[in-house]
Image (spheres, grey):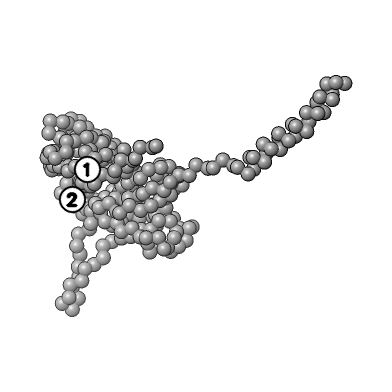
Amino acid sequence: MHSIRVIVRLLPLLVFTLTSGIAQNVTAPEKATEVPPRSLRLLPLGETPPYRHEVSDGVSRELEPDPNNIPPRQVRLGDDPTSKPLRLNLGIATEPVKIPGGTAPVILRESKAPVDPALKPWLTLHPPAAGDVLAVIWRDPKTPWKQPRAIIFPDTAAALPAGSIRIVNLLAVEVVLIFGSDRVLLAPGKALVKAIAIGTDHPVQIAFKINAGQYHGFYSGSVLLNPNERAQIFIHRADGEKPRQAAKVVTFNEAAPPPPRPQP
């Protein structure tokens, strides 16, 4: 009987404790972790079709190239017609544009396309959840620019710091790169980041594999980095009309973004 009286006396205290905990959970929920926005750049690779013109009444007029042979002149993000268009120039990276953080796909549409979410996008990108990214875009042989391919690279200071070079092989065969006395093999679809000395002219030779143990040299140049610079080399298929070489190289220097500040 004594035990029953003790339990009865404790019941109001238990009820108060439980309801207090519930009230705290309702009034002070945990804050969801927000993923900050980041930037996206686009780099289309390919070749501009040869110049064509017609003469009418003694006046020469340039003809527009076949739209299957060039990327859209401008694309927009998603289905917002007011979003700033991105102008695509072959071999030149666009200005960075803000995209949300997280794993949602990034939709790119031609600027002239109607605002209709049911329409197939020009390109759908799947970047990682965080960090600035560079999307390299190209087309396969005999494939129109309306069906592009893309590969995404981190575009942060940690992934490609000042004093380094990124080399990307988009060919279907292995390539060999010669940096002075260094010889580097790069498999199809692979990328390499290499640190190089600042202020030194680095001769670069590139060849692609044609047979077992045989390579065809097609590029000879050099890379010179100034302080706070980084460089990128993209090796891709030549898609011009009757190209003299089967492969092309796009290389450029750029200022490296500052490294992230240390967390307090």
Quote the CA–CA distance across marks 2 and 1: 36 Å
Q: Is residue 57 visible?
A: yes
**Viewer-side residue, 130 vs 64:** 130
Q: Is residue 172 visible?
A: no
**Viewer-side residue, 165 vs 168:** 165
- 95 relative to 199, above or below: below
Q: Secondary structure at mark 2?
A: loop
Is the N terminus in the top left, top right, bottom left or bottom right quadrant? top right
Q: Residue at x 82, y 28 (%)?
A: 8
**Viewer-side residue, 20 vs 257:** 20
- 179 relative to 234, above or below: above
Determine which residue is flagged by label 1: 228
Is the C terminus in the top left, top right, bottom left or bottom right quadrant? top left
Residue 157 spot, x, y in % from top left: 30, 41
Number of marks in the rendered image: 2
Tell me if mark 2 has few (under 14), some (14-19) or many (20+) residues whose alpha carbon lies within 10 angstroms of its own. Answer: few
Residue 82 spot, x, y in % from top left: 41, 63
Residue 261 spot, x, y in % from top left: 34, 40
Q: Amino acid at mark 2?
A: Pro
Tell me if mark 1 has few (under 14), some (14-19) or many (20+) residues whose alpha carbon lies within 10 angstroms of its own. Answer: some
Farthest-out residue, right: 1
Residue 88 spot, x, y in % from top left: 29, 56
Q: Residue at x 64, y 43 (%)?
A: 26
Q: Amino acid at mark 1?
A: Asn
Foreground mark, 2 or 1? 1
Numbered badge on residue 243: 2
- 58 relative to 81, above or below: below
- 156 relative to 64, above or below: above
